Image (tube, rainbow, N blue to C red):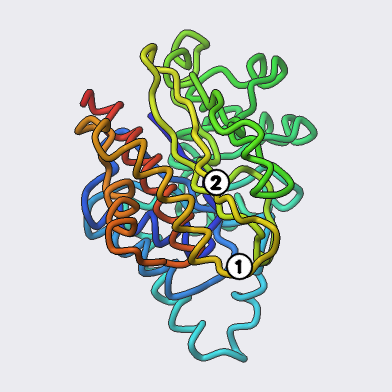
């Protein structure tokens, strides 16, 4: 099982929604969403997963963003009240795995879920802070959760023995997009090959986004397209297709065309059927049409490519 961990920003959610709507994730992928705001994009994405009978995990006590405060401000915002009702209705679906992060408020959240008759053994738990291992042991000693996402550290392997999922940040984020030109092709992951040997029930990463979270973006001097692929030994590598005219932030459409031209040169004749994902096909079509989809869509398509590629691999394609 693969559990890609994504923050619920707009283009991450749109990537997941498009994959689910087109049945491109497969049975072996369960995305984990840590929502950053209560929005129509979030509830529509969850709705698409439930309608397509695709599993997705949703963090109920996120550590980033404004999701919790959005709920608290509901009396002031009629639109968000509608979103809240839809969100709570969707949580009743068996396709939505209720999930918690082990942190200071985890015990109170577990009490609240128990009042709603949500059993601990049906939860997904994220436990990356060793300071909360004792709380985890206290709360889940007699009723272990369905899945536990943990880092590859000995203390977690000793304390958590069943249904643990290896969570690791595989994306080497650079300070600037132009910095990816210093090493355009690099190793990404081999967890899919060895997680069972290491006694994990599955593996998880932050896709091509990385764990670092920022509230808002900025206009970059360079455009970078991050495309993962399998080498001959089935290791997962990542290639960074980077624009050339990176002196300032002007003409992002031109910069995108420089980057996507490099992608087109590499993939127009070489991609196998399992590599030719919807995300990759859409990149190639933007090159042919000389169209610019916007930087958010560039990120969306790269995420879609990664997750569909992993789905094809896990499905044996």
The residue beneath circle 2 is: 242
Instruction: Specify the farthest residue to the top.
Output: 197
Please state which of residues 177 and 91 is positioned toward the viewer in this rendering. 177
Number of residues whose C-alpha sits closer than 10 Å to that of mark 1, classed few (under 14), some (14–19) or many (20 or more): some
Q: Secondary structure at mark 1?
A: helix
The picture places residue 167, in percent across and down from the top left corner, at 57, 31
Residues at circles 1 and 2 in contact by the CB criterion of under 8 Å: no
Q: Is residue 294 left or right of residue 103?
A: left
The residue beneath circle 1 is: 67
Q: Residue at x 60, y 30 (%)?
A: 168
Q: Residue at x 39, y 56 (%)?
A: 15
> How many numbered marks does the figure carry?
2
Please state which of residues 113 and 51 is positioned toward the viewer in this rendering. 51
Q: Secondary structure at mark 2?
A: strand
Q: Residue at x 44, y 18 (%)?
A: 235
Above or below 163: residue 89: below
Q: Which mark is residue 176?
A: none
Q: Quadrant of the N terminus?
A: top left
Q: Earlier in the sequence, mark 1 or mark 2?
A: 1
The picture places residue 234, in percent across and down from the top left corner, at 38, 17
Question: For the residues carrying marks 1 and 2, which lies nearer the camera in this image?
Answer: 2
State whether residue 74 appears in this view: yes
The picture places residue 159, in percent across and down from the top left corner, at 66, 19
Q: Residue at x 53, y 72 (%)?
A: 38
Q: How far apart are the two marked residues, 1 and 2, measured between alpha carbons? A: 34 Å
Q: Is residue 293 left or right of residue 313?
A: right
Q: Is residue 266 left or right of residue 173?
A: left
State whether residue 107 appears in this view: no
The picture places residue 151, in percent across and down from the top left corner, at 64, 27
């Amino acid at each position: 099982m693969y559990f890609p961990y994504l923050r619920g920003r707009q283009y991450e959610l749109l990537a997941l929604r498009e994959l689910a709507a087109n049945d491109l994730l497969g049975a072996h992928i369960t995305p984990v969403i840590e929502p950053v705001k209560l929005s129509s994009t979030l509830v529509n994405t969850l709705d698409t997963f439930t309608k397509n009978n695709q599993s997705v995990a949703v963090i109920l006590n996120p550590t980033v963003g404004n999701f919790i405060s959005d709920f608290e401000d509901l009396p002031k915002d009629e639109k968000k009240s509608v979103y809240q009702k839809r969100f709570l209705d969707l949580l009743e679906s068996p396709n939505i795995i209720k999930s918690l992060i082990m942190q200071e408020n985890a015990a109170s959240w577990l009490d609240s879920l128990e009042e709603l008759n949500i059993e601990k053994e049906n939860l997904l738990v994220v436990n990356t802070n060793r300071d909360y291992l004792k709380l985890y042991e206290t709360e889940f000693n007699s009723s272990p959760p369905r899945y536990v996402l943990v880092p590859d550290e000995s203390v977690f392997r000793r304390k958590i023995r069943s249904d643990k999922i290896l969570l690791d940040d595989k994306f080497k984020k650079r300070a600037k997009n132009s910095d990816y030109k210093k090493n355009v092709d690099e190793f990404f992951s081999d967890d899919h090959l060895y997680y069972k040997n290491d006694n994990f029930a599955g593996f998880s990463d932050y896709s091509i986004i990385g764990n670092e979270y920022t509230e808002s973006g900025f206009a970059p001097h360079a455009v970078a397209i991050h495309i993962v692929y399998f080498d001959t030994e089935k290791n997962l590598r990542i290639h960074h297709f980077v624009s050339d005219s990176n002196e300032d932030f002007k003409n992002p459409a031109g910069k995108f065309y420089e980057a996507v031209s490099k992608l087109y040169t590499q993939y127009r004749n070489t991609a196998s059927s399992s590599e030719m994902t919807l995300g990759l096909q859409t990149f190639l079509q933007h090159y042919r049409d000389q169209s610019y989809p916007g930087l958010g869509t560039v990120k969306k398509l790269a995420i879609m490519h990664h997750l569909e590629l992993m789905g094809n691999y896990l499905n044996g394609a």
